Amino acid sequence: MTANIDFRLLQFDSYNSYMTSFIRNEDYRYLSSMSPIRKLVRLGYRSTAKIYDEAEFNKLRAKILEFMNPKVLSSVLYGNHFKGTDAALSALMHREEPNLLHKISTIIFMQVRQRSGFDVSGYIDYEQSLRHCTFRKPDFTNWRAVFEGRELLKPKPTDLSYYDWHKGIVCMTDTDNFESVAGRNTLIFKHKDDHKLIPVCAKPSHYAENVSRSMIHSDLYGYIILYDHIIR
């Protein structure tokens, strides 16, 4: 598969849900049926991203699932404990095995409101976080509890990047997979294995082809962003 894998397709269980994601509420007011609305979507009036027809969607999604699930570590995957419907946890479940097999390397961005009412945000090295859980490293994230819904995932000062919006605390920590590098008006990480630069922002970048960016709405977490880098 090429470097530009469209991981966004994993958010959708069917072509219908994929098409519906591009439709706005006002479309129903001005157009009488779904047929003309879908035509507008296919013509690209609702998104700058490529719009797939049903055959393309099914073929590409099947290829992504095949690529990401080689059935090697299934007995030890924390995602096996996920029985819910949350889109963010579902996306992380699909990415767990390819991260552990070092096929891809995923950075999780999330912003979480604490009980105090103030937010913390951060970038999490997914593979390292999973591994630290397995080996019970200090301050590890209990991924089984996260997938079971008993605990909520949240950034920590020991993660790749951490920001406490109330206290103004900023922490940058190189991980086993990534290190931060100086970028012009943007945050950039470098993958330690293949030395590819990973821009983690929505702005245009010369290095955008090194990463696939997926923004996912979650009932538990609001929105999270997953940055998937295919390791060369």
Image (spheres, rainbow, N blue to C red):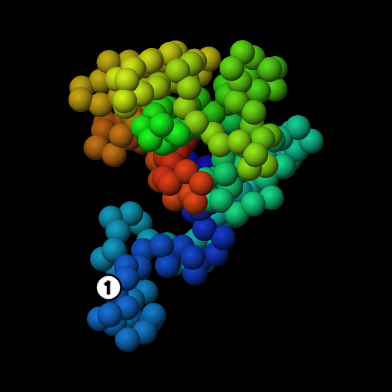
> For the residue marked with disc 1, what is the amino acid?
Glu
- Characterize the local packing of mark 1: few (<14), some (14-19) or many (20 or more) Cα atoms within 10 angstroms: few
170 above or below 201? above
Q: Pinpoint residue 5: horizontal percent, then vertical percent.
A: 47, 44
Between 49 and 1, which is closer to the camera in this rendering?
Answer: 49
Q: Pinpoint residue 168: horizontal percent, then vertical percent.
A: 29, 20
Secondary structure under tag 1 reads: helix
Name the residue located 26 percent from the left edge and 31 percent from the top edge.
Answer: 206
> Which residue is tagged 1?
26
Name the residue located 42 percent from the left edge and 67 percent from the top edge.
Answer: 20
Q: Pinpoint residue 91: horizontal percent, then vertical percent.
A: 55, 45
Furthest-right residue in this view = 75
Between 47 and 70, which is closer to the camera in this rendering?
Answer: 47
Q: Pinpoint residue 26: horizontal percent, then vertical percent.
A: 27, 73
- Quarter of the image for residue 184 reads top left
Name the residue located 64 percent from the left edge and 28 percent from the top edge.
Answer: 142
3 above or below 24? above
In the image, 218: left or right of 89?
left
129 above or below 11? above
Can I make out residue 143 in this image?
A: yes
In the image, 59: left or right of 211?
right
- Quarter of the image for residue 22 reads bottom left
Can I make out residue 227 in this image?
A: no
